[in-house]
Image: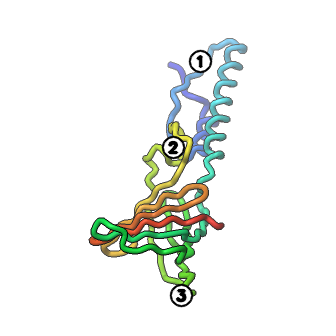
Amino acid sequence: MLPLIDPQIQIVLNAITGHRFQIPIRIQESVEPKHRDIKMKKILIMLLLVSTHVLNSNVSIAGETITTQEIDSYIYQDGKVDGRSKGQFEITYYIDGNTVTRTRVYDLIKKEVIPDNTVYQIQRQLLSDPTNIGSVFPYRVIRAIGQPGSDAIEILTISETHIQSVRSTNNYFVVSRSKRIK
């Protein structure tokens, strides 16, 4: 029976990717030194590719605070645009693990802070998620779903430069786009 990758390499790979899985690459114990060197080079190249992939997905880092300024917002009701707002809010989010928490909403017009602690669950199973190493999508985004009120659902799409959100209640929905400023 052939052993799996060296346990130390497996630990490093799991730490880099944030996933816990076994890679079905096997190394024969009785391999000539030349062949062993080639197999180790292949493993090192694979580790380099995985780490480069993870480091190049700049969407967010666990424990990161993101501040955005709203660019525009549209309210839809009864199948038509019912209102439009131009950049009324500055919003701060905190990303940690599999959650995004909206920690602060500042109304730029009224010059007041609106209390908020909405928690969103990041949808890591989506192929465009930055942690999904098997994805072929060149454009990576984080998507998260939360419940900002007793009768509302909101979906966030977090990219390197913007955050877009869609909030739905029983009789209207709001689509807004914000630019990352911090």
Q: In which quadrant of the rendered view does residue 13 lie?
A: top right
For this rendering, which residue is in front, 35 or 150? Answer: 150
Q: Secondary structure at mark 3?
A: loop
Residue type (three-letter) at the residue carrying disc 2: Asn
* Vertical side of 146 occupied by 110: above or below: below
Relative to 145, does residue 128 appear above or below in the rendering? above
Residues at marks 2 and 3, CA–CA distance in whole angstroms: 41 Å
**In whole angstroms, how far apart are the C-alphas of marks 1 and 3?**
69 Å
Q: How packed is label 3: few (under 14 Cα within 10 Å), some, or many (20 or more)? A: few
Check if mark 1's residue and mark 3's residue have beta carbons within 8 Å: no
Q: Which residue is mark 3?
A: 110
Q: Amino acid at mark 1?
A: Gln
Q: Which mark is residue 132?
A: 2
Marks 2 and 3 close (CB-CB < 8 Å) = no
Disc 1 vs disc 3: which is toward the camera? 3
Residue at horizontal 60 percent and vertical 35 percent from the top:
7
**Vertical arrangement, residue 6 with respect to residue 91, above or below:** above
Q: Which residue is mark 1?
A: 28
Q: Residues within 10 Å of mark 2 (few under 14, many from 20)?
A: some
Q: Secondary structure at mark 1?
A: loop
CA separation in Å, label 2 and label 1 = 30 Å
Q: Residue at x 43, y 69 (%)?
A: 74
- Counting residues from the start of the chain, the first of labels 2 and 3 encountered is 3
Q: Which mark is residue 105?
A: none
- Relative to 14, does residue 74 appear above or below in the rendering? below
Q: Give the image location of residue 103, x and y in percent.
A: 53, 74
Mark 1 vs 3, N-terminal side: 1
Side of 22 relative to 11 (left or right): left
Q: Nearer the viewer, mark 2 or mark 3?
A: 3
Expressed as whole percent of the image width and height from the top left, the position of residue 18 reads: 56, 47
